[in-house]
Amino acid sequence: MIKIKNFTYTYPERSTPTIKNLDMEIARGEFVLLTGRTGCGKSTLLKGINGLIPHLVGGRMEGKIEIDGLDTRKADISTLSRKVGLIFQNPDDQIFSTVVQDEVAFGPENLALPRKTIRQAMDEALKLVGLDKFQHRGTHMLSGGEKQRLAIAAVLSMSPEVLILDEPLAQLDPQGATEVLKTIKRLNSNGMTVILVEHRVHEVAHLVDRIMIMERGRIVLDNEPRAAFERIDVFRKLGLRVPESSELSCAMGFKEVAMDLDEIKKGMNNGIKFPAGPSKGPASLELPGEKDSGTVALEMEGVCFRYDRRTDFILKDLSLRIKKGEVVSIMGNNGSGKSTLLLHFAALLKPSRGHVTILGRDSRKLEARRLAGTVGVVFQDPALMLFNETVEQEVAFGLRMLHLGEARLDQQVTEAMNAMDIAGLKDKNPLSLSGGQRLRVALASIFSMQPRVILLDEPTSGQDKSNSDSMLRYLYALSKNGMTILFTTHDIEAAIRYSDRLLIMNSGRIIADGLPRKIAGDTETLKRANLRPPVSFEIGRVFGIEAFCIEDLVRMATCSG
């Protein structure tokens, strides 16, 4: 179905190729997982496959890409669009209609299909992604995860033969991710060829036929899943995530890498055991707990909020206190109100009822712009924050607006870029970077100002494990100096490792608030919010122990010989 030979591509105004002499073949009906650390060339490869490169992006392309016998350089975009459907990393990049049903119908309408066929295609696509009750909703009212599902529906309505998806799970809650993956697998089972770019390898590996790893524009590993995870050294070297069952089996010296819990059980019967008892917490990080400070940094009292008087309340009677220096993670299903809560603490939204206090001041009396340098916000879509010509200018912009002296400015910019591992990109245009790199630039632009409060909406989205861990460790270190940090996430392992406190939201209310490990083990509460405990917890429960990460399991395991 897809043949790529000696594909090399260099973006306009760049001298170094992003993709270098890449060869690849994918058979009709295969399901391929493509992964690699941010900036390795994955998104560029996808654009080559669907014809955006070279037709719309420009640049210099060498080699050849064929889709079902069509040379992408010779076939026009309209022809290729019927062969290949591409879901971008950021759904806002491809959603332009104001109403959900109009967005899904747009593609079939442009193919001049009969009205009845368009209606049927639209209804089926929306049902497949769980948005069948959202037909008349405004696209601007959707959460990030709902927008992702809408983007998928819009492509599915055109019935492509090849479906390629760039980080489709990045903004989805576990239930939403499961539903989307089931949809993709069902399409694949019906003969559709699928290429999935994803950092959440552990959530998709069991579905795919092959795993490919890219590094610096080349394929460095290409194998079926079990054989791929036998090369766990490659995943570790590149800071990539693997299923915990596979990681545990490698750490415990199993003869064959385990792919699921059943295979872990089998391996344990061969002499590896766990002593009963509670976990003492991850060795790499002190166990989070309540900070000593009694100063309240952020507070809500009886807050209700809705965007429009004709719609339901998004936040419902919320009361919350967050102390200076606390790191608080917020989890919940898409549309539960996480982002809305976060934006209240930046005074970007004002409560319909109740009161919000930010560093001792009533938010209703605050202009959001007056909080610059004091409260930093990183949005779910980092592109909304990037407008300078270079990364270095972007990171320095806020400090210049605060009139910081040049010597101190240079020091803080350098520190922030190093912390986010983007110093090597300082002369690049931020909008030319990958989604994960854009996010790190946006983070650095906020970190450089050293605000008293940092609010982050899905900061682990689109990040490989290495960059995600590095960023969150940096944040946790800042909190020890009194910085208050709130971040939303769908990654429960990140919440456990790097926050003092975990909030669970459901339908606009906080249904749990406490120590992350305690809440992560409360399966009933998690279930109410369509969340799941860590895989390590599930593995540990089978063997009668309490574990929340792979380090817990490895440290507590004993071998009888």
Image (cartoon, rainbow, N blue to C red):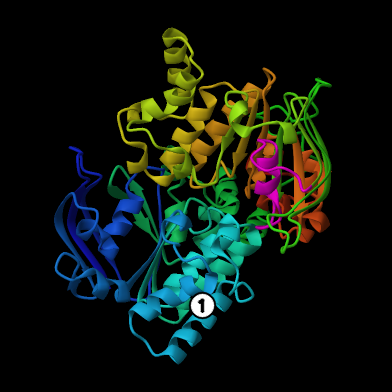
Residue 93 in picture, x, y percent from top left: 42, 56
Examine the rendered structure and indicate whether residue 380 appears above or below residue 291.
below
Query: Is residue 200 in the magenta section?
Result: no
Residue 538 at least partly seen: yes
Looking at the figure, which quarter contains the C terminus?
A: top right
Circle 1 sits on which residue?
125
How many numbered badges does the structure rendering display? 1
The residue tagged with tag 1: helix, strand or loop?
Answer: helix
**If the image is split into quadrants, where does the N terminus sit?**
bottom left
The part of the chain drawn in magenta is: 332-352
Rendered location of residue 25, percent (x, y): 26, 65
Q: Which image quadrant is residue 216 in? A: top left
Q: Main secondary structure of the magenta part?
A: loop
**Nearest to the observer: residue 115 or residue 19:** 115
Crowding near pointer 1: few (<14 within 10 Å), some, many (20+)?
Answer: many
Residue 351 part of the magenta segment: yes
Q: Which residue appears at 70% of the width and 52% of the height?
A: 337
- Residue 537, given in percent of the width and then of the height, sits at 72, 50
Tell which of 272 and 454 is nearer to you. 454
- Note whether 402 is above or below 430 in the view shown: above
Name the residue located 37 percent from the left edge and 59 percent from the top edge: 223
Q: Amino acid at mark 1?
A: Ala
Q: Is residue 286 left or right of residue 75?
A: right
Q: Is residue 496 above or below residue 327?
A: below
Among the 4 quarters of the image, the one containing residue 157: bottom left
Q: Position of residue 13 (x, y in %)?
A: 19, 39
Residue name at image x 30 percent, y 28 percent: 427
Q: Is residue 417 visible?
A: no
Q: Residue at the location (49% across, 85% down)?
A: 119
Q: State left or right for residue 244 relative to residue 111.
A: right
